[in-house]
């Protein structure tokens, strides 16, 4: 049998490795060379000049320096040759020349090498600095400059370092940041190079001392979402096993997963994990994924496209010059684009047309289905919100969409059009599983249109919708090419720009990437209702602030009609009672009414409920009001609206309707529910949950 032996490392390799590795090793090598040289010449001097008077002049006068000192001085001081006897001066010149090579050549070279190596390590992000109370960004993508701006815009966070850890070359990152950020914002930004899935590299970042962490990932990398998940697992494990961090959060292990105080909860590092795929985002909202991480970190899923969809539909914050009257600084409301609320008596219905079944298009459709639920559907079940996709590959993408949300299409019909033929083909697909009373009770319909965007059939379709006075039309152009998006928006049918009803507003949302200024310039004329969205520098990075209203929704469910929310004055609670209320609200956010740990799904359910509050208040004329009370009739209408919203939310988050379960029951593990049904089919006790949460909304806002 062939025997494998150890590799023999050559002396040259060992020298090169040790000499180029650490700065102190270079110094040690220099000292070693000096010592060997000195010993060598000392030995030669003893051999050639054994008697001191043959080597050093003036020894007879008693002022000699001694062989050791004189020889050492010869290495760095040429004038010392004068102290030698005439016979020893040739030897002294040789020593001086060697000394000049060592001290003027090697010493300067080593010093220069150490300095250049240090500069190179900094520029390439290979330093070993230790930080505390810092923000960590793992990976570098197009959203990172905007994230840095967000952190630096907060006066309380301006003095905290921002550490970027990425496998992208540091000089490239530095150049991008210099182009996009003011110099003041770069003062506290440190760039370190490395892989975010390398445990040893992560441990060097002092994760346990960080304030907040964003797991962003790299641009155009293969396996972005799985790599971010792996990185998050490592962060939780590293922090969870750190003694100093355990002391910080008041925990000794998983048995103390529930934070007992608000301070303990907020001491846990918030880890924001950005996903690219909508399917990954949905999966993490339906699975109790953070159950193994709660003992050490706070975990939040985020998605660039979903964040923008929320901003467009819920927050509506718009930084451009468009907008008139009350809409100044806001994107138009999709449920009320002309500013007139769609109330109980309205005969209008919302119709959102999305060009492109891209990640952004899917995110926008998902958010619209979550939030656009209106009172007039309670009166007339024909007034449904319609979401239409137009895409050249709509037939294939429709099947992918229906597979992803199979639970919706088990109970809901859908429509498919083929506009690529001379004669438009229309197919209505029945629900895939149920029939009769268990179908088509949702207040959202889906349409899928296979078509080229420039097709005349598409133009005819949009013209018809634009001229229908009962259709609240909005158009979103969501392809992955910003130039194509603008080109599509600029060449829509005339009726989109100038509807028959002059009071009708048809917003056209145009997805851009780096900048929306070109769309913003089109303020007047036919393009006055164009709005850019989706820009990399406009994404929200609010951490857990987005969950504040969701915590109130959750607390309301837990405490009932006598619920009271903690009041603050600045950063401090007004009273001791308010502080205790805040502590209770944090505990209820972590456990359910049976004392079990609250799942990630439960938290997102509360968040979607919270995000729908502003639309509900707008639909009954209370938008922006404070200190108002809902009438019994308003409560009854909105309770039904809330249940319609809840039905859709549960389906979008992965729950299936199951008629075999007991009335109003659920199987959480299998994601089965028997409450996904019309409001009138629920038990009265279950209906009262919807009435109660609606009744408490004025208190929440």
Image (cartoon, rainbow, N blue to C red):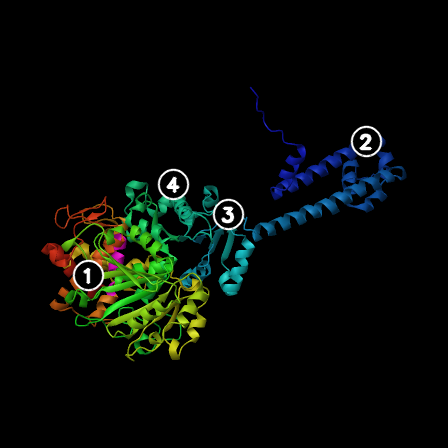
Relative side of 453 to 124, left or right? left
Question: Sequence-wise, which precedes: disc 1 or disc 2?
Answer: 2
Examine the image and state in which quarter residue 670 appears. Answer: top left
Residue 55 on the magenta segment: no
Is 231 above or below relative to 9? below
Q: Which mark is residue 642?
A: 1
Residue under numbered circle 2:
46
**Considering the numbered disc 3 on the image, is that residue within a helix, a strand or a loop?**
loop
* Cα gap from disc 3 to disc 4, whole angstroms: 22 Å
State the residue at coordinates (47%, 42%).
200
Residue 407 in sight from this viewpoint: yes
Image quadrant in which you'd find residue 329 = bottom left
Q: Identify which residue is drawn at 35% across, 66% down.
A: 476
Question: Is residue 609 highlighted in magenta?
Answer: yes
Q: Residues within 10 Å of mark 4 (few under 14, many from 20)?
A: some
Q: Is residue 326 above or below residue 560?
A: below
Q: Point out the image quarter for the C terminus.
A: bottom left
Q: Is residue 373 left or right of residue 195?
A: left
Q: Nearer the viewer, residue 508 or 47?
A: 508
Image coords of residue 57 (percent x, y) = 86, 39
Q: Secondary structure at mark 1?
A: helix
How far apart marks 2 and 3 lie (CA) works out to 55 Å
Furthest residue to the left? 684
Q: Earlier in the sequence, mark 3 or mark 4?
A: 3
Question: Quick check: marks 1 and 2 in contact, CB under 8 Å?
Answer: no
Task: Decide which of tag 1 and tag 3 comes sooner along the chain.
Answer: 3
Q: Which residue lies under the disc numbered 4?
A: 241
Whole-number angstrom distance, CA of label 4 to CA of label 1: 43 Å
Label 3 sits on residue: 194
């Amino acid at each position: 049998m062939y025997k494998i032996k150890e590799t023999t490392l050559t002396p040259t390799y060992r020298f090169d490795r040790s000499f180029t590795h650490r700065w102190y090793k270079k110094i040690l090598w220099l000292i070693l060379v000096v010592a060997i040289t000195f010993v060598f010449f000392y030995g030669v001097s003893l051999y050639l000049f054994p008697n001191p008077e043959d080597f050093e002049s003036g020894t007879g006068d008693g002022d000699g320096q001694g062989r050791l000192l004189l020889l050492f001085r010869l290495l760095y001081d040429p004038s010392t040759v004068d102290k030698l006897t005439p016979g020893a001066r040739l030897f002294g010149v040789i020593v001086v020349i060697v000394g000049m090579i060592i001290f003027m050549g090697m010493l300067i070279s080593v010093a220069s090498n150490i300095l250049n190596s240090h500069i190179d390590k900094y520029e390439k992000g290979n330093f070993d600095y230790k930080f505390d109370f810092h923000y960590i960004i793992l990976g570098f993508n197009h959203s990172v400059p905007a994230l840095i701006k967000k952190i630096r815009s907060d006066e309380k966070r301006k003095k905290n370092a921002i550490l970027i850890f990425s496998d992208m070359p540091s000089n490239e990152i530095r150049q991008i940041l210099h182009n996009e950020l003011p110099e003041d914002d770069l003062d506290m930004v440190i760039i370190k190079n490395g892989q975010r899935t390398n445990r040893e590299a992560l441990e060097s970042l002092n994760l346990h001392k960080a304030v907040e962490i964003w797991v962003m990932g790299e641009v155009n990398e293969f396996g972005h979402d799985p790599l971010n998940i792996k990185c998050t697992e490592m962060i939780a494990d590293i922090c969870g096993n750190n003694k100093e961090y355990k002391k910080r959060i008041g925990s000794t292990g998983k048995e103390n997963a529930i934070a007992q105080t608000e301070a303990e909860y907020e001491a846990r590092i918030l880890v924001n994990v950005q996903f690219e795929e909508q399917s990954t985002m949905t999966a993490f909202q339906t699975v109790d994924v953070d159950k193994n991480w709660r003992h050490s970190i706070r975990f939040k899923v985020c998605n660039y496209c979903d964040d923008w969809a929320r901003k467009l539909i819920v927050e509506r914050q718009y930084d451009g010059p468009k907008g008139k009257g009350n809409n100044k600084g806001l994107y138009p409301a999709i449920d009320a684009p002309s500013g007139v609320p769609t109330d109980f008596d309205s005969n209008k219905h919302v119709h959102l047309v999305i060009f492109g079944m891209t990640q952004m298009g899917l995110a926008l459709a998902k958010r619209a289905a979550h939030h656009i639920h209106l009172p007039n559907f309670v009166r007339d079940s024909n007034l449904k919100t319609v979401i239409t996709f137009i895409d050249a590959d709509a037939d294939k993408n429709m099947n992918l969409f229906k597979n992803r949300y199979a639970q919706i299409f088990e109970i809901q019909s859908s429509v498919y059009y083929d506009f690529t033929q001379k004669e438009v083909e229309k197919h209505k697909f029945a629900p895939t599983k149920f029939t009769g009373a268990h179908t088509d009770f949702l207040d959202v319909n889906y349409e899928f249109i296979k078509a080229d965007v420039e097709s005349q059939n598409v133009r005819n379709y949009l013209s018809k919708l634009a001229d229908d006075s009962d259709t609240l039309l909005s158009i979103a152009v969501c392809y992955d090419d910003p130039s194509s998006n603008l080109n599509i928006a600029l060449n829509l049918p005339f009726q989109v720009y100038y509807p028959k009803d002059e009071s009708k507003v048809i917003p056209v949302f145009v997805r851009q990437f780096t900048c929306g200024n070109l769309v913003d310039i089109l303020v007047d004329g036919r393009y006055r209702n164009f709005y850019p969205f989706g820009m990399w520098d406009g994404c929200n990075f609010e951490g857990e602030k987005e969950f504040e209203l969701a915590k109130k929704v959750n607390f309301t469910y837990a405490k009932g009609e006598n619920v009271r929310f903690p009041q603050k004055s600045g950063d401090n609670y007004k009273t001791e009672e308010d502080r205790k209320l805040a502590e209770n609200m944090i505990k209820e956010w972590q456990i359910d009414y049976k004392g079990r740990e609250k799942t990630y799904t439960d938290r997102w359910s509360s968040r979607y409920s919270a995000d729908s509050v502003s639309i509900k208040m707008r639909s009954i004329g209370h938008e922006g009001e404070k200190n108002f009370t809902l009438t019994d009739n308003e409560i009854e209408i909105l309770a039904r609206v809330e249940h319609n919203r809840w039905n859709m939310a549960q389906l979008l988050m992965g729950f299936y309707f199951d008629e075999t379960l007991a009335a109003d029951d659920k199987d959480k593990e299998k994601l089965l529910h028997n409450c996904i049904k019309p409001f009138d089919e629920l038990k009265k006790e279950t209906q009262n949950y919807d009435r109660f949460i609606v009744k408490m909304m004025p208190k929440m806002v």
